[in-house]
Image: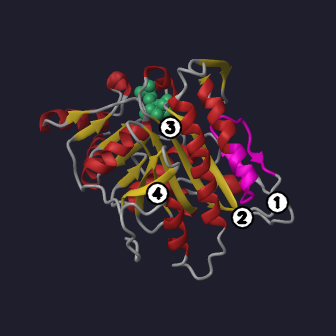
Amino acid sequence: MNDKLALPVGTTLDRFIMRKQEEFPYASGELSQLLRDIALAAKIVNREINRAGLIGVTGAFGNQNVQGEEQQKLDVIANIRFIRALRNGGEVCAILSEEEDDIILTGNNKGKYIVAIDPLDGSSNIDVNVSIGTIFSIYRRISDADLGSTPADCLQKGTCQVAAGYIVYGSSTMLVYTTGHGVNGFTYDSTLGEFFLSNPNIITPKTGAFYSCNEGGLNSFPDGIKNYLEYCKNEGYSARYIGSLVADFHRNLLKGGIYLYPQTAKTPSGKLRLMYECNALAFIIEQAGGRATDGTKRIMEIVPSELHQRCPLIIGSVEMVNKVEEMLVKEEALH
Ligand code: P6P
């Protein structure tokens, strides 16, 4: 579904958010303000990423997060920056962060929204200057404001998202988001401290020639995935895998392509997290005309049971995802 109101390239993010809010007569401005809060934190994190090598914030922090993954210093910094911006913004009653074991209650009991966030995804790439990203989902709270936020607020299906987006800190820094009315991309001009509309109404190509997958896990992939990867090679597709989900996703969104992180022996439920990686990108890709599945069901239909649960992810151009699904079903029928 595309936007009713087409705004020109060069529109600032602030003006874009304001003009889009005008399309909803009953909107009271909290979601708009929340998007601004996220953009503010992104500007701060962008600055620290760009100076990481100069201010001694590269490398490992020395802790492991709830995922058992080595936290990088910038993981911790980004987590602090986004949590602070969301808490101070006042619109959010609870935050689910990849870097926090439990839900963070912000104390804003009147806050209407929940944010699930991966503050800095792909952080192992920071020290080698490869693009990294932030991924976020926004949900409306379902708990009673007077009784305070509950875990159920943070365990909603992807179809309940009211907004989702990512920031890719790459050759340029871009914020891409949807509120369910199309997908728009904004490029950051650090000299002005503003995001400007650069990619209005993004529609992802129905097919593409890029496939993104860590084939190091090939031997333990499901047969249908193995068959699809063989198909990609026979079709002459190009393997493009940066090891940074947001960067791989962003390229495939714009150019057409598919990203696959299936279940493996090492990661039997897949590696990526449903609540703050897969759901957000699934919302975006569907709004742009693509698809996202775990191999058996639509990502946004998965009913969450744990805050940090993982799921296999197959996401990108609709015809490519359909082909994977076809091969998985065919293999399933043989057993
Ligand atoms: P592997 C980064 O840790 C991440 O979550 C994604 O950004 C990336 O696509 C994937 O994991 C890389 O995982 O197993 O290929 O190193």
Decide if ligand 1 comes within 8 Å of the CB at mark 4. Answer: no
Decide if ligand 1 comes within 8 Å of the CB at mark 3. Answer: yes
Q: Nearer the viewer, mark 1 or mark 3?
A: 1
Q: CA distance from mark 4 to mark 1?
A: 27 Å
Q: CA distance from mark 1 to mark 2?
A: 8 Å
Q: Indicate the quadrant where residue 57 lies.
A: top right
Measured from the top left, where is residue 72 in percent x and y? 59, 23
Packing grade of label 4 (10 A; few <14, some 14-19, many >=20) is: many
Amino acid type indicated by mark 4 = Phe
Q: Are marks 3 and 2 in contact (CB under 8 Å)?
A: no
Q: Quadrant of ligand 1?
A: top left
Measured from the top left, where is residue 88 in percent x and y? 75, 51
Q: CA distance from mark 2 to mark 4?
A: 20 Å
Amino acid type indicated by mark 1 = Asn
Hey, which residue is sitting farthest right in the picture? 146
**Upstream in the sequence, badge 3 or badge 4?**
3
Q: CA distance from mark 3 to mark 2?
A: 27 Å
Magenta residues, as a range?
Answer: 83-106
Q: Which residue does the numbered mark 3 point to in the structure image?
A: 272
Q: Nearer the viewer, mark 4 or mark 1?
A: 1
Q: Which residue does the numbered mark 1 point to in the structure image?
A: 109
**Upstream in the sequence, badge 4 or badge 1?**
1
Measured from the top left, where is residue 155 in percent x and y? 65, 53
